[in-house]
Structures are given as structure tokens and as C-alpha cells.
Image: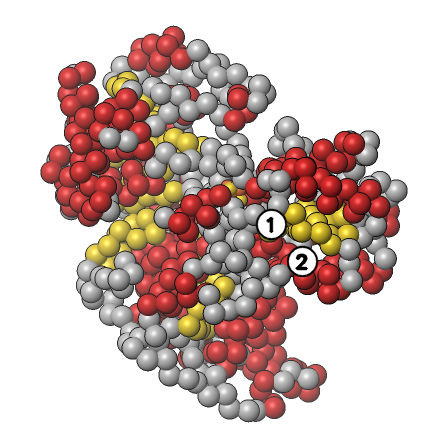
Amino acid sequence: MHPLLAPKEGERRLLLGNEAIVRGALEAGVRVGAAYPGTPSSEIGNHLFALSQELSGLYFEFSVNEKVAMEVAAAAAASGLRSLTCMKHVGLNVAADPFLTLAYVGVKAGMVVVTADDPSCHSSQNEQDNRYYARLSGVPMLEPATPEEARAMTLYAFELSERLELPVILRTTTRVSHARGVVTCGKLADYTLFEKGRFEKDLKRWIPVPAVARERHRVLLEKAHEAEELAARSEWNRMVKRGPVGVVVSGVSVNYVLDAVKELGLEDELSLLLLGFTHPFPKSLAAEFLSGLERCLVVEELEPYLEEALKVVVAEKGLSVKILGKAEGYLPRYHEFHPGLVKEALARAFELDYRPPEFPDTSWIPELPPRPPTLCPGCPHRETYRVVKEVLRELGEEEKTIYPTDIGCYTLGLLPPLKMADYLLCMGSSVGSACGFSVATDQRIVAFIGDSTFFHAGIPPLINALYQGHRFTLVVLDNETTAMTGHQPVPSQELRPEPLKEKPVISITKFCEGLGIPTVEINPYKKKEAAEAIRPILSSGKLGVIVAKAPCVLYRAKFKG
Amino acid sequence: MAQGFRILAVGVGGQGILLFSRVLGEAALVEGYAVAMSEVHGMAQRGGVVESNIVLGEVRSPYISPGEADVLVALEPVEALRALFRCRKEATAIVSTDPVVPQMVKDGLATYPDLPPLLEKLRTVLPRTYLLSGEDLARKAGSAKALNVVLLGALAGSKVLPLSKEAFLEALRRVVKPAYLDLNLRAFDLGYQAVLSAQ
Ligand SMILES: Cc1ncc(C[n+]2csc(CCOP(=O)(O)OP(=O)(O)O)c2C)c(N)n1
Ligand code: SF4
């Protein structure tokens, strides 16, 4: 039995934030899940995938990208089935297009969109603050501070979504998704049977042609009004009024503030507004909290999102309280916080004399060798890079070539001795940027992309390259899995778990050949043959594809084990 | 600190830090302590730095600031040095002395420091430091992979946390797959004894 099914109602378990979200969804009776993996959200999809093989009443798919996953979940919710999609923060950029209009047409059954942000870029290319997607879309947002809250808020998110007929954002950060804490489980829904939903046609609802969209925008704003009232009364927004200095806080920082309050001995003095239901911003509650305060510190990671909302309330209500936030230099606008940083800001707001704790003398420690993650021993990506490098060296082009790269294990090809990664924006950008370099320079271009990334965002720019006549070599690293995020399935994989055996194998080689692009498939471990096979494509410099096919060694081992 | 404990566990990807912290968390649960932790899962590749923050009792924040760790458990000696600034001045350190040489060093792009004088110095800076060869003990237990559980035994043996040996054993039984339980119980005991005899 899957470990998330084992706990009975009332049982306490040590769960990861992401596991708590899955448990909450199972208690809410989620029927359809669809996701594309991305740290720090990946465990949610992994668990739902495993659970869907055990529970006849649950459908889950790893979709090819977040946009598709969003659309799958949206259609399920429109058909009356509770649905969930989850993604890392940048995943919502990919899914933003359907998401912003989904806010107009809405849902019938509850739909939860989990976005997991990554302050400090632990495993991401940026640290964008996805709370702005709530403001941009008008969709309600909940932000848990702990795994316990993550479970309960997921459950509530489905109810809220159904009540408003809108999707609901559940926003976490790395330190919530990957925190482990004690969670008291509730009752599981019944999963013995997959009962199909039914889509009721309604042209004035589901087809946002201009006349409908204009009306639906008005409906959305009305719902936002209702949601704001719910937020103001929500048990997820807790207010404690004590002295004239206050703190407003949300997310993981709630823990840092509560610890700091205790350690600085401010329990009887500090006024607190702990926010979990953060969009629509509960203005009336904020006004009640701020009135009578002298100063109010805002503790939130990344952008001054709550801070600016509070300043609007102060201006609208003509309050005299001084808001102390990022603009005032109390806390930084970048990177994740740590408890000491918050303690210091709180002490400063209180005008307390505070010195950070002393640590042991470290002056005697010499420069330590760095330990960046590296490609595993025997990794097929390394072999592919080597053989491409060798042929380019023969051609005298190794140094001059531009290497647009993409996101995955193979991005580590940037490290010496390979040094074959020069430019990267986001998933799929290897191919699109290769098009641009082909226009803008005379340099040779060899781009690298993984199999999962190819299916995710590599296909439209490849068609663009063919149609526009751009010239570059695209090396597709088909290791038969999405390795970087924990070995999720890909459509091209031949080595696959039993439940996926009925699905077709979608060959990247055949796909590219079908477009009429010169394509070769190589086994990167067979150096000599591989070099022979790729030489014509690399020396021509015209559009061509090399598919390096060899399974990730960890995936293969896991598979056999 | 009477009200709570902050434990920082550091090591290298593939050494089993996540299992280490899960068992420790479970042991706290067995004893009825509140517990919170955070792990940085990072990428699937091996060889990067991995850390886990575990807090027990009256602490809620699952993340440890510079100068705040009560206990440092390092599965690799250079990682102990790298994390030293996160410790309190009175912290206890439990350190496995077997190096895991980074790829950058193997490729000749960085140097691995000469350990003995540094570990000697570590003892003077943090008087409550326990050094043990985790790998030797793990191999003696039956597999070098049990290094994480050797260090767990050492942590239990140091008695720096208010968790009984029985709580750790119960936690191991809950978390470890039955096929590996005997090996891990042996590894735990070897770590436990190593620290007792050093005291
Ligand atoms: C829009 C977006 N979604 C998800 C991710 C997370 N992510 C990074 S790389 C990657 C896929 C890697 O798979 P693949 O291209 O097959 O390369 P591999 O890691 O197997 O070498 C994912 C899902 C991301 N960075 N951006
Ligand atoms: S996990 Fe697989 S693809 Fe990633 S570095 Fe290791 S062997 Fe290569």
C-alpha cells in the first residue's frame, strides 16, 4: 500500500509538505491530476502517479508540459471532477496562457493549482514571485506555512474553488514543500470507482469570444469581491492585537516570526497578523489590524507584495501607522530568509539592542574545494558531449562554436572539462535561441536539449527553424527519462514501468525524419561509430538533428532494482 | 538551550542524509517531541553538497541560521568545516573523517586540504567534537552505505539530545526496509559504541 494511504483519520505522520498536499487532495476526493515535474513541486506528481496505479478512482498523468497539464485539469473540473495540477514557479509561466482565461470561464468542481516557488534558486533559473499570478489572474490564493497547514489548506482549497467556481492557487516555497513536519491526517475519500463526470455545454460560459469574455471578466470581479470577504473572515488569517508595534507575515516566515517573538521576549507586546489566505488581499482585516498601530514590520520573502497592499490600505484609510518593509531596508527583496535575519529585523523594528549569535572561529579554515553537482559516473550525456567535442575539434570548430543549452542534467556540460554550454533562458530555449544565433552570427551552432525538454518546448522552435531556414545542429539527449527531477516518464522511453507499457513509444528520431530534417541516431558509448555518424551533420552546419539514445544510468539501475 | 534543539546534518549527495534525518525525526516523534525539518532536494545528480535541518521541541523554524546549530553531524570532514559557521560556540560536532573527494579535485581543478591538522584544530575550536571513521564502522557492519546510520548511532551515543536509544531503534524499525534492518542495527550500534568509548 502507498504510504500516504496508510494513516487513518486522526493519525499523526511525519510528512513532507508536498506529501501533505497529496494527502489533503486524497481527503478532498481529487479525481484527476495532471502535472509536469519541477523542483520543488515534483514529489506531488510522483506520489499521485504512483497512487493512480493503485486507486481505480484516481487518474493522473505526467503531461508533456505545464500548459497541457493545466488544460487537462481545467477540462476535468469543467466536467464536474475535482482536479489538481502542480508545477514549479516557472511552470506557471508556461501555463499562464490557459490559466488567465480559465479565471474567466471558471470551473464546476474544485480545481487546485499548486505553484512551488524557489527563493534562493536552489534548483531554478530564477526566483520569480508567483504571488503576482494571483493578482494578475484574480484567482484566490492560499499560502501554507507548514506541512500541517498544507494538508488542511489543500482540503479547504477544493471547497473554496467549488464555492466560487474558480480555480484556487496553493502557493508554496521550497521551505514549505520540502519541510517535514507532523501532520494529523483526516479521512480519505472513496477511491474504489472512477465515476466519469459530464460536461454541460454552455456557449456563454465556456467560449470566451469577446462578448462572453467581457461578461466573464465582470463575473470574475464580482467573485473576487466575495472572495475578499471570505479572506477577511478566514480562519487562515489570524490577528492578535497587543502593543503598538505589529508584524504582518505569511508563508514559511510565520515560523521565523513566532520563534523570534519568543526568543526576544515579545509575547506580551507584539501585535500579529498571520496571513494564509492572501489573495484577494483582506483589506478590511488589514485596516482593523493597522488602526492604532505605530509601526508595522512586513515579513515576506521576495517581492514587497503584502507590503504594497498594506501601504494602499494605509493610504485609503488615512492611517498613521508606518509600514516597515523592503522599501525601508528592513529585509531584502532577494533570496530566501533565515530565522536570524527575521529576528534582526524584528529587533530593529522594536528598537531593541540585538546582536546576532556568535559562531566559532573559522579564520583558520583554508579555501575548501567546491562541490558542485556533477554528471554521474557513466552518465550517457558525458559520452555524447565528448564525441561531439571530438568531431568539432577535428573540424577545428570546437572553440568557435556557440553551444546553446537547455535545462536538465545535461546543463552540467557547462563545467570543465566539457565547457559546452553558452546560453540558456528556459526550457526549450536551446532551439529558439539557436534560430536567433543563426540569424545574428556567422558562428557554428550546436545546441543541446534533453528528451523531456524536447517534448515540453523543443518542437515548435524546431519547426520554426525548418520553415525559416535556420542553420544549426540540434543534439537531443534521449536518456529515456526526465532525470533531473527524479526520473519521470517521457514519451520516447522504451525502458518503462509495467503500467505504461500499453502506451506508444514516440520516437524522436522518426519525428524529426518525418519533418524531413537530416537526422541520425547514435549510441554515445560507441565512440567510433557515433563519430562517423555525426560527422556529416556537424560539418555541413545546416539544420540537422543528432539523437543520442542511451538510458540514464541511475534510471536503468532503479528500473532493474 | 533548554527549550529546543537545532541539529544540522551535512554531507554529500548519495550518502543518505535524507534517511538520516527521517530516522532522527521519527525518533523525536516516538519520544513525543514536536519536530520540524527541511531538506534541500536539489537535483538528482550525485556529488553535490546536501544538508538537512532538524529542529526539536520549542523551535518551529525548520531552518538553522549562522551561529544557531546546537549539534552538527557531518558525514564528510570538509563539509563539517564548510558548515562550522552555522554552529553555536558551544555546539557538539559528530564528524566522519573519511573524505569524499570532489570531482573538481579529481580533475585537478581544486585541492583537497590536508585533514589531520584541520581536524585537530576543530577539536580545539569546538571541544565537544567526536571524530570517527564512519566508513570503517559501516563496512564492519556489512556495507559502506550504512555510514549515515553509523553517524546516527554516534549521535545517540553522544546523548546530546533528549532522545533515548530505544526511540532511535524504534525509529529505525519504522523507517528502514526490513531487508536492511539488521545491517542498520549493527551500524547504529557500532556508531553508538564508538562515541561511548571516546567519552
Ligand atoms: C517550465 C519548467 N518546468 C519544469 C522545470 C524543471 N525541470 C528542469 S529540467 C527538467 C527536465 C529535464 O529532463 P530532460 O530534458 O529529459 O533532461 P535530463 O535531466 O533527463 O538530462 C525539468 C522538468 C523547469 N526548469 N522549467
Ligand atoms: S541522473 Fe542520469 S542523466 Fe542525470 S547525471 Fe546521473 S546518469 Fe546522467
> What residue is at 31 percent from the left and 24 percent from the top?
B135
Residue A115, percent across and down? 49, 59
- Badge 1: residue crowd in 10 Å (few <14, some 14–19, many ≥20): many
Some atom of ligand 1 lies within 8 Å of the CB belonging to the residue at label 2 = no
User: In front: A25, or A433?
Assistant: A433
Residue A186, percent across and down? 25, 66
Query: On screen, A70 above or below A447?
Result: below
Callout 1: chain: A
Please indicate whether residue A555 sits to the left or right of residue A509 in the image: left
> What residue is at 88 percent from the left and 42 percent from the top?
A442
Residue that badge 2 annotates: A509
Q: Is residue A340 visible?
A: no
* Residue type marked 2: Thr
* Residue type marked 1: Lys
> Extreme right residue here?
A442
> What residue is at 24 percent from the left and 59 percent from the top?
A184
Residue A433, percent across and down? 75, 50
Q: Earlier in the sequence, mark 1 or mark 2?
A: 2
Asked if labels 2 and 1 touch by Cβ distance under 8 angstroms, the answer is yes
Residue that badge 1 annotates: A549
> Element type at marker 1?
strand
Placement of the N terminus of chain A among the 4 image quadrants = bottom left
